[in-house]
Amino acid sequence: MNISHISRRAVIAAAAALAMPVAMAQAPAKLKVGFMLPATGTFAALGTAIENGFKLYLTEKGGKLGGREVEFVKVDDESDPSKAIDNVNKLIKRDNVDVLVGSVHSGVAMAMAKVAKESGTLMINPNGGADAVTGAMCAVNIFRSSFSNWQPGFAIGQAMAAKGHKTAATITWKYAAGDEMAKGFKEGFEKAGGKVTKELTLPFPNVEFQAQLTEIAAAKPNAVFSFFAGGGAVKFVKDYDGAGLKKTIPLFGTGFLTDGTLEAQGASAEGVLTALHYADGLNTPRDNAFRLAYVKAFKMQPDVYAVQGYDAAQMLGIGLDAVKGDAKNTAGFAAAVTKATIDSPRGKFTISKAHNPIQDFYLRQVSGKENKVVGIASKALADPARGCNM
Ligand code: BEZ
């Protein structure tokens, strides 16, 4: 037997045994992110933009958040609140995700928040504006990188009154997002001296607008406020123009009416005024770099949904860095995120005690294929967080 050969093997084996625990300690388990977003239906493109934005930030951070590599589990929530509880339970109980990211639809976001609150699972909401998520349902583990429905509604209400309009009709889908944006609009408009004279709705996601357009024509308000998004927004803006209303009754909305939709809306959207926490033509180094990177990665222009996805990842990274990747330490995560200033492409913002962004709302006007920033509708606007006891 060759003694020197045995001893060399023994030395290698001993070294490997010694090195193994060290190597294992250096590679924490992957962070499981559960994406619950729409991949089908009228909001499908919004879900894609959120996912793209999230992944862009992750790539910029070398594929890690809080020192952990990330793996995704995805569910198509179909923007269907009746399936939401089952879907989110699958992500938590079957897939054991560390964090929930979703959703777009307010009703789905509320169902997610309910389950997240009960289970204590960390949740970042990258769109769904339901006021309750950072209002009555607020919790230490629930965050939003987007907006509350009240915020853009209130901002455009004030802006419409500032343009000298005295009466307005509102038209929205009949569900939490439509109801709450119209309510925020009414509060902002009437506080500034306007009067809402007609309130019209149709069920989500219907797009047959003729009956309501006829009512608007007969009521002759000074201006119209509307909330629609995705495919529904494309059809509404075209139908409003097609009915001949755009020339006589100016159309306003929360910015979802024209964000990510201008290519399809064409000339029908020209001149429409909206308020949102993102706009084209911000021309800041931060936004320019983001837009360049997004176009390079996905061969399409970013929109507000992409920014909200990007900032969801950014908030997750900030919070997880503070707790060394421990997604269960939601108190430590919350302390870090509420202390931080988020360096967003939209402009810097902070997170309120109720975990909703405090941010500027831009006044935007459609010009060609852009939602051009033409002013600030509301500076550093904080949601009132009604019902939140945190
Ligand atoms: C919502 O349901 O909260 C929503 C959907 C699309 C755009 C904005 C808000």
Image: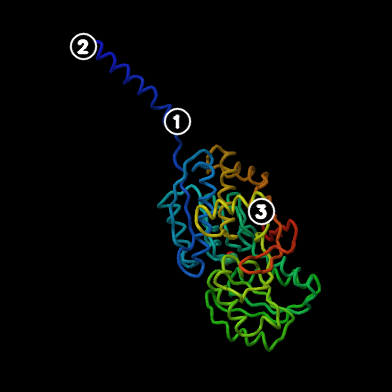
Quarter of the render that holds ligand 1 = bottom right
Q: Which mark is residue 370?
A: none
Q: Secondary structure at mark 3?
A: loop
Marks 2 and 1: CB-CB under 8 Å?
Answer: no
Of label 2 and label 1, which has the lower sequence position?
2
- Which amino acid type corresponds to the residue marked 1 in the rendered image? Ala
Report crowding for label 2: few under 14, some 14 to 19, many 20 or more residues within 10 A (C-alpha): few
Is residue 78 depicted above or below 246 in this figure? above
Query: For residue 11, which quarter of the picture?
Result: top left
Q: Earlier in the sequence, mark 3 or mark 1?
A: 1
- Camera-near label (3 vs 2) is 2
In this view, the residue in front, 19 or 348, is 348
Query: Of all residues shown, which one is farthest toward the front?
Result: 368
Residue marked by disc 2: 2
Q: Quick one: which residue is furthest to the bottom in this view?
A: 218
Q: Which secondary structure, mark 1?
A: helix
Q: Which residue is mark 3?
A: 354
Residue of label 1: 25
Sooner in the amino-acid sequence: mark 3 or mark 2 = 2
The answer to whether 184 is drawn above or below residue 238 in the figure is: above
The residue lying at 58 percent from left, 69 percent from top is 262
365 relative to 166 in the view: left or right: left
Q: Is residue 21 above or below residue 143?
A: above
- State the CA–CA distance, disc 3 to disc 1: 36 Å
